[in-house]
């Protein structure tokens, strides 16, 4: 127990004036959601608490990492702050060369909620001797049996809490649904903010679109008409064929209530549960418009919480920039388009594919050059150096990394990249056209 004695001696001397006598620790904070204020106040508050905890136990925070709005319980979620924490612990120092002797966090469930993350954290923390794990309860010895048992106990509590919370949320949504209460979240297109009263202009558009689709009109043509009228979705996006399909095939247009991809039926009569909102169309009109689409494209197949029913998985993206590039063209009123830029077949050997804006069509660029620029931003930009492990960087540059792995790395580093239009008749390549928005 020499470690405990040594740490106790340091902690009791926390009032020393020389900061070099304090234990240098990393601070970590995480929140699962930040949907309302979106200002990172949750992680900011946690980092302040970590500072106070460190000072109270003879420690000094030498670097802080955080993940705002990132779940630690869902599989596949990348946490850049956690990855940088692991990197610093393994190499034993911060980017500035400061030695690391431990980690401070508000609670264990901020660090890990999955066994894989606990294993990685403990392996990195104990990769050098004499380190500590600090929280509001005090100093913990991660090398001792007691410290390991406490970590596993915290993991079990976090897993149990996650399951109970998920079950409670599922039951809550189901109970609301069987009573015909409208969906929570952003208001549905066609209704006012109360989600019950019809929106005069939008409801008329939906009713007209249902009739036009039943009469044989292409859904893309309907979407183009909406764009020409200046219609935007409830989240500000421009309508396209898929969004129009989801709107006019949603059961809510005829008053039916659905939950997780299935119509809710009354246990007594077997009839569909009716919502409390005003319908736009009749059940017969809804069934007629749904019959004009192939399986897999309807709201009941692709809506929120609905499982895929086509039996065929969505094809994987074939290019690095797919899903990450946004149009930076400006409209006459000065607003930026920000529409998704999709890969399309090119007309030359140098550019076998190009990225083009599917909304305004006023911005496009060579696909291979855009992917090269995105790769250079990630590997060469100074801000991104701390985001990748060195072995990950070398693996990427070796040419052996798959496209799927590269796209996961890009997703962990950038929110999206804004692409500014090029100059007409200027065929030179300007890498500054791509402006990344870093996470």
Image (spheres, helix red, strand yellow):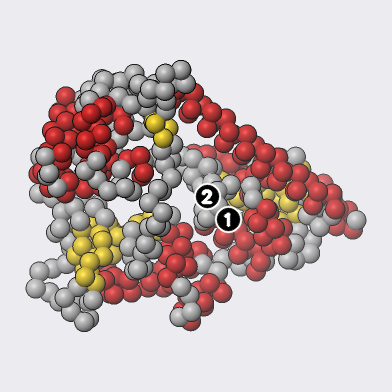
Q: How many marks?
A: 2
Whether residue 286 is visible, yes or no, is yes
**Kind of element beneath mark 2:** strand
Quadrant of the drawing holding the C terminus: bottom left
Residue 108 is drawn in which quadrant?
top right
Report x, y in % for residue 276: 34, 18
Which residue is located at x 30 percent, y 35 percent? Answer: 250
Residue tagged 2:
67
C-alpha separation, residue under disc 2 versus residue under disc 1: 7 Å
Residue at 31% across, 47% down: 295
Mark 1 closeness class: few <14, some 14–19, many ≥20 residues within 10 Å: many
Which residue sits at x=84%, y=49%? Answer: 146
Side of 206 relative to 81 (left or right): left
Query: Residue 82 shows which numbered tag?
Result: 1
Q: Secondary structure at mark 1?
A: helix
Q: Position of residue 197 (x, y in %)?
A: 26, 20
The quadrant of the image that shows the N terminus is bottom right
As drawn, 319 above or below 413? below
Q: Position of residue 80 (x, y in %)?
A: 52, 57
6 and 79: which is toward the camera: 79
Q: Nearer the viewer, residue 90 or 287?
A: 287
Q: Is residue 376 above or below residue 76?
A: below
Q: Residue at x 27, y 48 (%)?
A: 294
């Amino acid at each position: 127990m020499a470690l405990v004695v040594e740490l106790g001696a340091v902690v009791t001397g926390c009032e020393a004036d020389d900061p070099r006598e304090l234990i240098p620790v990393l601070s970590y904070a995480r929140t699962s959601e930040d949907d309302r204020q979106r200002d990172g106040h949750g992680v900011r508050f946690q980092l302040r608490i970590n500072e106070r905890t460190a000072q109270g136990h003879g420690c000094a925070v030498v670097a802080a990492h955080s993940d705002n709005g990132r779940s630690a319980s869902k599989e596949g979620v990348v946490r850049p702050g956690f990855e940088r924490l692991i990197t610093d612990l393994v190499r034993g120092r911060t980017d500035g060369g400061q030695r690391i002797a431990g980690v401070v966090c508000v609670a264990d469930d901020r660090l890990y909620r999955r066994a894989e993350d606990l294993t990685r954290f403990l392996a990195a923390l104990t990769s050098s001797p004499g380190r500590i794990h600090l929280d509001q309860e005090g100093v913990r010895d991660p090398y001792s049996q007691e410290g390991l048992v406490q970590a596993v106990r915290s993991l079990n509590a976090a897993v149990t809490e996650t399951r109970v919370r998920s079950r409670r949320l599922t039951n809550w949504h189901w109970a609301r649904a069987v009573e015909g209460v409208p969906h929570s979240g952003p208001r549905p297109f066609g209704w006012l903010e109360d989600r019950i009263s019809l929106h005069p202009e939008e409801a008329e558009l939906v009713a007209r679109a249902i009739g036009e689709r039943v009469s044989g009109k292409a859904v893309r043509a309907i979407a183009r008409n909406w764009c020409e009228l200046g219609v935007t979705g409830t989240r500000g996006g421009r309508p396209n064929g898929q969004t129009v399909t989801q709107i006019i095939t949603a059961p809510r247009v005829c008053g039916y209530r659905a939950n997780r991809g299935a119509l809710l039926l009354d246990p007594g009569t077997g009839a569909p549960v009716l919502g409390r909102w005003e319908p736009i169309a009749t059940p017969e009109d809804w069934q007629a418009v749904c019959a004009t689409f192939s399986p897999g494209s309807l709201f009941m197949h692709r809506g929120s919480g609905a499982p895929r029913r086509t039996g065929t998985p969505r094809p994987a993206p074939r290019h690095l920039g797919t899903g990450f590039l946004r149009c930076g063209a400006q409209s006459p009123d000065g607003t930026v388009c920000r529409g998704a830029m999709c890969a399309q077949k090119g007309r030359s050997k140098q550019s076998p594919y190009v990225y083009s804006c599917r909304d305004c069509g006023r911005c496009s660029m060579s696909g291979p050059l855009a992917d090269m620029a995105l790769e250079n931003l990630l590997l060469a930009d100074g801000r991104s150096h701390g985001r990748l492990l060195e072995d990950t960087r070398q693996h990427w540059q070796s040419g052996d990394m798959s496209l799927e792995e590269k796209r996961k790395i890009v997703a962990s580093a950038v929110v999206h990249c804004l692409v500014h239009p090029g100059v007409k008749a200027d065929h030179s390549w300007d890498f500054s056209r791509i402006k990344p928005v870093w996470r």
